[in-house]
Image (cartoon, rainbow, N blue to C red):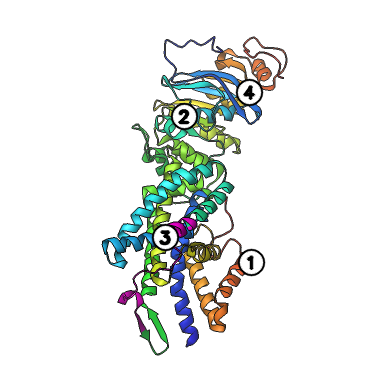
Amino acid sequence: MQWVNDIIQGILTGGLYALFACGLSLMFGVMKVVNLAHGDLAVIGAYIALGVITVTHVPVLWSFVIVVPIMAVLGYVLQRTLIQAALDRGVLITLLVTFGLSVVIENALLQFINADSHSLGVGNAIITGSFSVGSQIQIAYLLLLIFAVAVVVLLGLQYFLSGSRYGRMIRAVADDQEAAQLSGIDYRHVFGIAAAIAFATVALAGIAYGMYSQFSPTTGTDTILLFAFAAVVIGGLGSLWGTLLGGVVLGVAQQIGAQINQSDQFLAGYIVFLVVLALRPQGLTTRRAQS
Amino acid sequence: MTEPRRADNGNTPLLEVMDLTVHHGQLRALDRVSLRVFPGEVYAIIGANGAGKSTLLRTIAGLHQPTEGSILYDGKNMTKVRPERRATSGIGMVPEGRRLFGSLTVEENLLVGATYARKGPWTIEHVYELFGWMRERRTQRTAQLSGGEQQSVAIGRALVANPRVLLLDELSLGLAPVIVQRIYAMLPQILATGLTVLLVEQDVSQALRVASHLQCLLEGHTTLEGRPADVTPAQVEAAYFGLSQSAPGAVGEGSEP
């Protein structure tokens, strides 16, 4: 029964990890940018949520209505300026630039806020409550909610990418920028749109993490980015549903690791990550590169 | 100017390239190439591999920046205009190697082509009529199509934007001769809608068959220019391979460095 509980908890945590990962995957899939500031941006989202809640007293669960648009605009602007400038100089430069951005964000947060840990929605019944199934399985409302949000986000992304005009343009640009230009498409604008969407998911990830656990200026790189990377690599780079599978595999591995020995929780996750990298480097869901 | 012998009926050219020089790094890929394409014309650029033909088309489309020279389209200077703006103002291109969106279906490729379409006769429906097989395979990914079919989709994708001038880069590349014939056989139907065509072709006989005007490039230089009826096979051969006896119609300045 304990194992069943572990697996259920792992799957639900996987929803959170998928939320971490899908923006990273989208940005890599469309513009081949590995955004090393991804986690820090999620933390910024959490801080913005904290500020918004403090100032406007909007309920924690509704803070996303304000934070998501702010982050989306930030995503568009960052992509059109800093990241595009890096891309124009080569894909490798984007690694350096986003790494630099990550350092700047962390230190700015330390400088202008502080190193304290914060969390969102302490005392809220939905966020801290749970219900029991049988005698041994406790399911937190929050994890269930986050899992549902992750599924809705992935469904929404899939629907948008496959069904809408902009989604089609994003896929076209991801396939061939020059050919898209010959069809009159300004790929830099399309990149901006893709970044805005990615940053919107990053905002959700930040808020979700802020409710799930505590965050501080360094949470972005030491937790969110690492888990996002692990989920993306396990699931398969550039595959949206792969991020959910990767997140779930990572979550289950961590739970089982913790069951064996509390201190092995994260180790178990990274072992799975390394095994996948060694045996199936393209990830669980993606096929070998197709021409 | 290298445009001495054209009877242009007082028309203004739709597309004019003046003294275009393009470098790839240190390499001078094009050296002061000029051309004028008049409305309704099929202008063919021929030349061997590495002659600079594709570079010329890509520069006209805006994918390369010239080091010198200018590109006029419909009287407007397009030299500094971004490629997507050139596309939306009516310069269409079928790039070398098709360059389809491989993860998109046939229909999605056409829809992308039509995203910023100008007003005009071409619709996706019209493309399906031109290429009979395409309608029932519209939901297939283009990666699953044969080379000739992919080339047809690439042509369709360019047509649905309703360009005024269509740049065709090596339609015959990698295709069986019979498929090439079939694709070129479509050209009259395409021209009948009022398009102007500038094409690049390695297959000289194919180019001579369809062209109303011809220019031969050799290592970035113009070596021959004229109407197909006015040039002899010997002149074409000399210009194409850079043989030393300068043919009467040749305008090249002699030997290469």
Instruction: Residue A120: say if magenta.
Output: yes
Task: Label 3, secondary structure: give it.
Answer: loop
3D distance between C-alphas at marks 4 and 1 = 49 Å
Closer to the camera: disc 2 or disc 4?
Answer: 4
Identify residue for label 2.
B166
Marks 3 and 4, Cα distance to the nearest angstrom? 61 Å
Distance Cα–Cα, label 2 vs label 1: 48 Å
For mark 4, give the secondary structure.
loop
> For the residues tagged 2 and 1, is the chain the same?
no
Chain for numbered disc 2: B
Q: CA distance from mark 3 to mark 1?
A: 43 Å
Q: Is residue B96 above or below residue A6?
A: above
Q: Which residue is mark 3?
A: A113
Crowd rating for badge 3 (residues with CA inside 10 Å; few <14, some 14–19, many 20+):
few
Protein chain holding label 1: A
Question: On the same chain: label 2 and label 4?
Answer: yes
